Amino acid sequence: MSLTLCEITALVDGALHGADVEIFGAATIDSAQAGDITLANDAKLLPELAASGATAAIVTAEVRPDGIPFIVVDDVHAAFTKVLLQLRPPRTPRRGGVSPAAHVDPSAVLGANVEIHPGAVVGEDVQIGDNVTIHSGVQVMAGCKIGSGSVLCPNVVLYEDVQIGRRVLIHGGAVIGANGFGYQMVGGRHVLSAQLGWVEIGDDVEIGAGTTVDRGTYGPTTIGEGTKIDNLVMIAHNCRIGRHNLLCSQVGIAGSSSTGDYVVMAGQVGVRDHVHIGDQVMLGAMAGVKDDLPDSGRYLGAPAISERKQMVLHAAISKLPELRKQVKSLTRRLEQLSPELRDAA
C-alpha cells in the first residue's frame, strides 16, 4: 500500500511543506530508507534526519528539515501512528468461538462471543464474561472469574479462584495466583505457610509477559483499576497495589506491601515487605524502598531517599577526589612543618 504526502497531510490534519511524493513505508530515523516517511519531534534530531534515507518527515513546528518535504503537526507520535495504521494495518483475527481442540470443563459458564483457542484449558466452575479471548496454551484453573472484554495471551496461567476484571490484558507467560514465598521453620525444616487466599485484578489493568502475582495468605492480593505492569515484574503475596500505578520491568515488591494511586516505579525498583508507598510517589530506577514513603515524593537510590537529598549527596561524592588530594597535600605540609615546630618548642 502507498499514500501520497497530500493524502497523509489530510489524514493527520497537518501542513505540507515541499513536493507531493508517494510514500510506501514508515520507519524511525535510524532505519528509514528511500520511500519511507519518518518522524522528528526535536531540532536535535536534524543531523540524524539529514543522514537518514527517508523521503519525507512528520515534524513539529520548530523542526525544519532541509532537502526533503515535511509535514508539520502538533502531535508527532499521534500523527505517525495514524500513518503506520494506514500503511501497515494491524491484523484483525477472525473470531472462531470455542475451538474443539480446547478443553472447557462442562461446569464452566461462558458469556457471549467468547473466543478460546486450541490447546487452552478451562477448569471447573470458571466464569467467563462476554467478548473474552483466551489464546492457546492458557490454563484457567478452577473457580476463576474473567470479566468481559479481557484477553489472556498464550501460555498465561491463572491459578484457582483468580478474579480478573473487565478489559484486562495479560501478556504471554504471566502467572497469576501462584503460592507466595512464605515458610515457617518446623522441626528444622522449611514448611510452606498457609496459601488460602486469591488474586483480584481490577478493570483496565495490563500485565506484562513473564510477570508473576502471588495469591494472598488468607485474603486477596489486589491490583487496582487502570494499573499497568511491565514484563518480568514480581508482586508477592498479600500486596495491595493501588489504582493507575505504572510498574516498569523487573520491579520486585515483597509481601504485604501496598501502594497508593498513581505510583510510578522505574526499572528494577525493589520494595521490602510490609511498607506503604503513598499516592503519586515516583521511584527512580533501582531504588530500594525500606520504609514507608509519604504522598507525592520523588525518590532515588538504595536505600531510597528524596531526589533533593540524593542530588546533594551525589554533588558531595563528586568532590571527594579533590578533597582527597587536598588532605594528602595538607598531610605532607604538616610532615614538613613538624621538625620546625619541635625546634621552635
Image: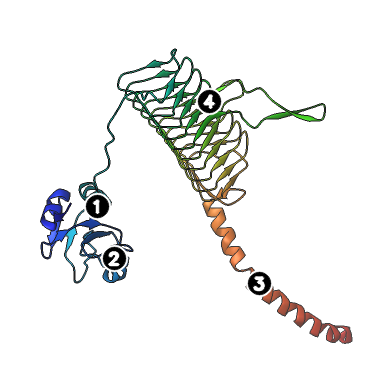
Residue bearing the label numbered 1: 80
| CA–CA distance in space, label 2 to label 1 | 17 Å
The amino acid pointed to by label 1 is Phe
Residue bearing the label numbered 3: 323
Q: Earlier in the sequence, mark 1 or mark 4?
A: 1
Tell me where residue 269 appears, x and y as whole percent. 55, 46
**Between marks 1 and 3 in the image, the one whose residue lies nearer the viewer:** 1
- Up-down relation of residue 253 to residue 219 (above or below): below
The reply to whether callout 3 and callout 2 are in contact (CB within 8 Å) is: no
Between 70 and 266, the one lying in front of the other is 70
Q: Earlier in the sequence, mark 3 or mark 4?
A: 4
Q: Residue at x 23, y 63 (%)?
A: 62
Q: Residue at x 41, y 30 (%)?
A: 225
**Between marks 1 and 4 in the image, the one whose residue lies nearer the viewer:** 4
| CA–CA distance in space, label 1 to label 4 | 40 Å
Residue bearing the label numbered 4: 159
The amino acid pointed to by label 3 is Leu
- Up-down relation of residue 128 to residue 313 (above or below): above
The amino acid pointed to by label 2 is Ala
Q: Residues within 10 Å of mark 2 (few under 14, many from 20)?
A: some
The reply to whether callout 2 and callout 1 are in contact (CB within 8 Å) is: no
Judged from the image, the secondary structure of the residue bearing numbered disc 1 is helix
